Amino acid sequence: MRDDQASRVIDSKADSNEVIWNFFRMTILFSSNHGCVVSCLALATARFESVGAWQTAVLYTAYVGSSFLGATYVVKRLGSLRSITLGMGLNCFYVGCFFVATMDWCTVKIPSVFFGAAIGGVGNGILWTAQGVFFAHSSEIHANCPGRSQSDSTTLLAGLFSFSYLAMEVVMRLISSTFIKLCDVSWSTVFLIYTVLAILTT
């Protein structure tokens, strides 16, 4: 390797703390956004009964379909970070359809929940594919920092992701029970809160 090539390699090695911070920030936003999704998913059958069960089926069908048929292409074209943003943006449609369906003025409640589930399923397919690529890339960059190995970097980032993901899921799930029991708000208000949070974390 020539000296100028070696110098570019050295200069490209990001500071370890910076890599960890960037990954942790993405993880918090990712986990918060996805926490809104799984919180609404848990309430689907309870709020919409049989329609909620069919909505969940649409969500997972779209998720599996997009994972196999188009997510990899999207991530390859847009890159992992933009694909994560796109996936979280599409998740907002899924969360938002719960708010729309609980409003009295909505006359297309069933079509709205199915539409939101289909869009959200596609978004999740892209989101999880992109997250895997982003994780692998971050781990590789962190391993290139002085004194780091690939296995240590992978273990560290996996631990950060797991902790953040589970913590934010618990926090998001607590929102509905807390606001319903303590604040005596309507379900439409709860779903509005989830929608706003999903948008803000995108």
Image (spheres, grey):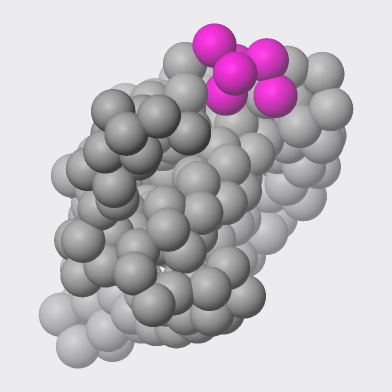
The residue that appears at 42% across and 52% down in the rendered structure is 141
Query: Looking at the image, is 130 positioned above or below residue 146?
Result: above
Q: Position of residue 68 (x, y in %)?
A: 84, 27
Magenta residue check for 74: yes
**Dividing the picture into quarters, in which one does residue 21 lie?**
bottom left
Would you say 51 lies left or right of 111 here? right
**Dividing the picture into quarters, in which one does residue 105 lie?**
top left
Q: Position of residue 104 (x, y in %)?
A: 34, 35
* Residue furthest front as drawn: 2
Task: Work out whether residue 122 or residue 1 is closer to the camera in this orientation and state it.
Answer: 1
Q: Is residue 125 visible?
A: yes
Magenta residue check for 3: no
Query: Looking at the image, is 181 positioned above or below residue 60?
Result: below
Query: Looking at the image, is 61 positioned above or below residue 29?
Result: above
The residue that appears at 33% across and 79% down in the rendered structure is 171
* Residue furthest top as drawn: 77
Task: Work out whether residue 49 or residue 192 is closer to the camera in this orientation and state it.
Answer: 192
Query: Looking at the image, is 19 positioned above or below residue 119?
Result: below
State how many labels appear: 0
Q: Quick one: quadrant of the C terminus?
A: top left
The residue that appears at 32% across and 34% down in the rendered structure is 3
Task: Work out whether residue 15 or residue 190 is closer to the camera in this orientation and state it.
Answer: 15
Would you say 52 lies left or right of 177 here? right
Q: Position of residue 65 (x, y in %)?
A: 82, 26
The chief SS type of the magenta part is helix
The stretch of residues the image draws in magenta is 72-77
Q: Is residue 120 visible?
A: no
**Dividing the picture into quarters, in which one does residue 26 lie?**
bottom left
Q: Position of residue 55 (x, y in %)?
A: 71, 40
